[in-house]
Image (tube, rainbow, N blue to C red):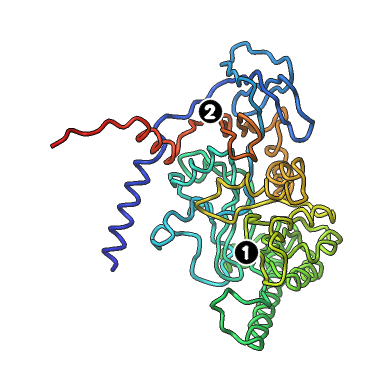
Amino acid sequence: MKNLNLAIYLFFTLTCLHAQQVAKSISGTFVLTNATVHTITNGDISNGQVLIKDGRIVAVGSSVSTEGARVIDCQGGHIYPGFIDGGTQLGLSEVGSVSLTQDFNEIGDLIPHMQALTAVNPNAVAIPVTRVNGVTSALVVPRGGTFPGTAALINLHGYTPAQMYAGYKGIVMNFPSTGRRGRRDRRSEEEVNKDQEKATKKINETWDAVALYAKIDSTMKADGKTAEGYKPELEALLPVFRGESQLLIEVNRDKDIEAALAWIKEKGIKAILTGVSEGWRVADKIAEAGVPVITGPVLSIPTRENVRYDVAYANAARMHQAGVKVGIRTNDSENVRNLPFNAGFAATYGMGKEEAMKSITIHMAEILGVEADYGSIEEGKIANLFVSSGDPFEMKSRITHLFINGWKVPLESRHTLLYDEFLDRKPGLNK
């Protein structure tokens, strides 16, 4: 069986390498002209221009100097900031049925120090497939136990994970659930409740251990010593305990969301709620707590049999209308390219196009604390942007130019290469 798995892995690896980018990205100074610039934060600029230099946006307006720059005529297209997906396994999973190609779930229940960034495969086939749809950044999130590891924001361009790193990391926590784990979960209600109580107790015991470790660490530092390496799992949680970084809390059922909000308030930590599929039920309470949310996928089915078919579509809108800052994710590994269509459904079901656009651009950047560099088209920000023939929420629109970190990235993917291969087929010789 091991040999069979290895053979399958090698087959898909070679296939992936064959399907990767052929043309090279180009760096330099570029000016995009003849386009409507959708800045997101400062309105739209008709017949606008954007100047890119040294990886950043250095000028935006209707009259930008083109001296020394390569001029790109956008032919009446639309310039948008690159989309940011707030939760994926992109680059961590290649083939769902082959375990050797999956690296998002480590062994252990308390492993916050495990870094998702180190496991990212820059050559993953799904990365170019994703970015040609306008998604330039994604939060890669580990799965597994109570504290499965540390998520990282990456740009979808680079030869190494370090080159792709986009400046944000956050420890993930799976909050104890009072619900079932799926249709095959045959536990009784009593067993479900006992498991939830056990998990809650474990989280509180872990946090007590972190509090003690923080005291030990402070005492040792006062004496010119360090406790680093003594307990790596507790060491990783120290910045969260001290309010220096956020905790990404995955929670979905309404009762669990309320419990998570109470826990956040009790511990006095900074947090982001992720998942939040039943956030519409307790939207006012989330807004009152002032905790931001990353929800999705929007393209999903109801969590319960007795609710409307469209609750997943309207969930983000209901929370936004209550005053919650909302970002949208796909929570996928292969179809992260569908992020704009998830946002499009949220727009249609009550969120509105403007707010839905913000949920995958500036609001997502603000939630992750990277708004100084990402999320809008402004002078000084990193040049993550794309040119579209029309509304990027519409499937008929096509991306015509793509920039990540100021690099002009070829619009190639496994799909485009296969399309080109079979577009003009030449039949072989008859035998």
Q: Dot 1, crowdedness within 10 Å: few (<14), some or many (≥20)?
A: some
Q: Dot 2, crowdedness within 10 Å: few (<14), some or many (≥20)?
A: many
Q: Nearer the viewer's eye, disc 1 or disc 2?
A: 2
- SS at circle 2: strand
Look at the picture and state if 195 lies above or below 326. Answer: below
Please state the horizontal and vertical placement of residue 184, each as a whole percent of the image: 54, 77
User: 397 or 59, which is in the foreground?
Assistant: 397
The answer to whether 52 appears left or right of 273 in the picture is: left
Amino acid on which the number 1 mark rests in the picture: Glu
Q: Is residue 223 visible?
A: no
Quadrant containing the N terminus in the rendered view: bottom left
Please state the horizontal and vertical placement of residue 24, each as a whole percent of the image: 43, 29
Report the disc number at residue 408.
Answer: 2
- SS at circle 1: helix
The answer to whether 268 appears left or right of 195 in the picture is: right
User: 188 or 41, which is in the foreground?
Assistant: 188
User: 185 or 251, which is in the foreground?
Assistant: 185
N-term-proximal mark, 1 vs 2: 1
Q: Is residue 109 visible?
A: yes
Quadrant containing the C terminus in the rendered view: top left
Look at the picture and state if 26 lies above or below 147. Answer: above
Q: Residue furthest top?
A: 67
Please state the horizontal and vertical placement of residue 158, each as a whole percent of the image: 49, 39
Amino acid on which the number 2 mark rests in the picture: Lys
Look at the picture and state if 283 lies above or below 153. Answer: below
**CB of mark 1 within 8 Å of CB of mark 2?**
no
Q: Residue furthest front?
A: 430
Residue 291's image quarter?
bottom right
Residue name at image x 74 percent, y 61 percent: 242
Please state the horizontal and vertical placement of residue 362, each as a whole percent of the image: 73, 41
Report the disc number at residue 235.
Answer: 1
Look at the picture and state if 273 lies above or below 132. Answer: below
